Image (tube, helix red, strand yellow):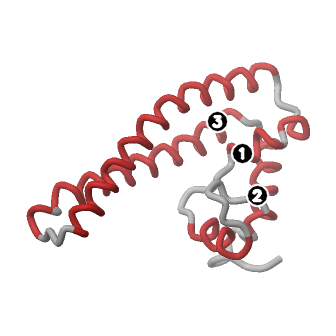
Amino acid sequence: MMPHPHGMPGWHGQKMMANAPVPMLMPIVWRHAVELQLTPSQEKQLKSWREEQKTQWQSQRTQTENHNRALRDALLRGETGSALKPLQEAVVQDHAAMLQRGIAQVEFLHKLLTAEQWQKVTGIYAKMAHWQPGKEGWHKP
């Protein structure tokens, strides 16, 4: 299993991955690029995508951290009701943006990869995450 980016290995990391709404496929593509036999064009598109996303991600992460901190601080100050509403909305918008970015990434990969490459990537993901398509939930292999 791939380690969690925040250093939470083992069961906790598996549980988080099992609960993630969007599969993390990009690290699999990069890690298995040779096995997938990516074409030079695919590699170029992947690098362009990564560079484009890197700047946007850093900006989004900073904004999300600021909104999270503002809501947390307001809660710790005992604020309630209308004082929390705009802070809550900002946090929800950040989560929605993050979800859309993840979905866009999966859609990008699905369009970029050949059917055979896509099957390999999703197969690796299935083994790594213990996901069994067509069945409800997560299962041990």
Looking at the image, do the residues carrying marks 1 and 3 touch, with CB atoms under 8 Å apart? no
Disc 1 to disc 2, C-alpha distance: 9 Å
Q: Which mark is residue 111?
A: 3
Q: How many marks?
A: 3
- Residue matched to label 2: 2
Distance between the Cα atoms at labels 1 and 3?
Answer: 17 Å
For marks 1 and 3 on the same chain, the one whose residue lies earlier in the sequence: 1
Q: Name the amino acid type tagged 1.
A: Pro
Quarter of the image with the N terminus in it = bottom right
Q: Which mark is residue 27?
A: 1
Query: Which quadrant holds residue 16?
Result: bottom right
First in sequence: mark 3 vs mark 2 = 2
Secondary element at tag 3:
helix
Q: Nearer the viewer, residue 6 or 32?
A: 6
Q: Residues within 10 Å of mark 1 (few under 14, many from 20)?
A: few
Q: Nearer the viewer, mark 1 or mark 3?
A: 1
Residue 77: image x %, image y %?
A: 19, 68
Badge 2 element: loop
Q: CA distance from mark 3 to mark 2?
A: 24 Å
Q: Where does residue 141 sit, x and y in percent of width and height?
A: 83, 76
- Residue 117 left/right relative to 75: right
- Kindly state the secondary structure of the residue where label 1 is placed: helix
Q: Residue at x 84, y 42 (%)?
A: 32
Asked whether, in this view, residue 22 is left or right of residue 80, the answer is right
- Residue type at mark 2? Met
Q: Say which residue appears at 35% left-offset and 42% top-offset.
A: 63
Q: Nearer the viewer, residue 2 or 26?
A: 2
